[in-house]
Amino acid sequence: MKKELNTIKSTGKMIILILVAVVQLFPFFWLILFSLKSNTEIFDPEKILSLPEVWHFENYSMALQGGSIVRYFFNSVLYSVVTVVASGLLAAMAAYGLTRMEWKLKGVVAAIFTLGIMMPVQATLLPLFQVLDATGLRNGYLGLMIPYIVFAIPMSIMVLSSFYRSVPRELEEAACIDGCGIFRTFFSIILPIIRPALATASIFAFMNTWNELLFANTFVDDEAYRTLPVGIMTFVGEHSTNWGLIGAGLVIATIPIVIIYFILSRQIQTSMTVGAVKG
């Protein structure tokens, strides 16, 4: 009887998980169908959820060949990779100093980073534009990389700080007894341990940078430095728009995020559950 009850519970959990998975995956599935349809089918209420009558695979070839979408794609990759690496390293060091060391003004610095999470991005748009324009950094790679890195750091610090608290201090004490300095302790011992948390922070940083549109559309005028979201905007015509083409561009923009998540999913799960098993 107990075995049958456990089987029923397991089956119920599996059904619930399958339903949740279907709900989560449906928007992406619908986007793929959207990208393979013509405008006539897209705006037909009776065909919103149906398969395309004619599969317009040329939408993808047009998206890749039209304009400078490939250049925009690689620009987004460059911005995202630099942001993930730079913000991850800086946030890891800052979070280590805030959670594992005692020093004056630590609370003030922590409050400043917390303020960086709460501050709306829109409120910083005009001051950032003026600063970047005055320093000659606007309309270039650094004009986007610097704001992306700075805005990624506070969230990464929050993720990493919670993970640092689960790391035993005995590891650092043993390293200190063995003669390791602070930097060697951090890079040789602490940094490898926090890889799951770094993976989680990297996902957030990558997604925010990859999907960012406001800064990219404001700080960059030259086509050579534009990002993929800005490039997809160029598909919108003045008098008519091929929405299937835009859908294809959105699918192309979504695939890297899905790939990155699958690569780092195991480490992300480890980061999320580490606090639950502590002690």
Image: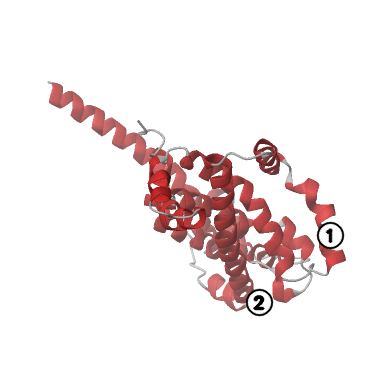
Q: Which quarter of the rendering shows the C terminus? A: top left
Pointer 1 local density, CA inside 10 Å: few below 14, some 14–19, many at least 20: few
The residue shown at (80%, 53%) is 125
Residue 278 drawn at (x, y percent): 37, 33
For residue 131, the mark is 1
The residue shown at (73%, 56%) is 214
Answer left or right for 88 relative to 11.
Answer: right
Answer left or right for 93 relative to 176.
Answer: right
Tag 2 residue: 68
The kind of residue tagged 2 is: Ser
Residue 3 drawn at (x, y percent): 13, 26
As displayed, is residue 51 above or below residue 197?
below
Answer left or right for 264 relative to 115.
Answer: left
Q: Which quarter of the rendering shows the N terminus? A: top left
Q: Nearer the viewer, mark 2 or mark 1?
A: 1
Element type where label 1 sits in the image: helix
Residue 262 drawn at (x, y percent): 40, 56
As displayed, is residue 164 above or below residue 210?
above
Pointer 2 local density, CA inside 10 Å: few below 14, some 14–19, many at least 20: some
Residue 79 drawn at (x, y percent): 62, 66
The residue shown at (84%, 66%) is 135
**Could you say which is closer to the camera, residue 114 or residue 246?**
114
Q: CA distance from mark 2 to mark 1?
A: 29 Å
**Could you say which is closer to the camera, residue 92 or residue 51?**
92
**Could you say which is closer to the camera, residue 96 or residue 129?**
96
Element type where label 2 sits in the image: loop
The answer to whether the residue labelled 2 contacts the one labelled 1, judged by CB atoms less than 8 Å apart, is no
The kind of residue tagged 1 is: Val
The residue shown at (84%, 53%) is 127
Mark 2 vs 1, N-terminal side: 2
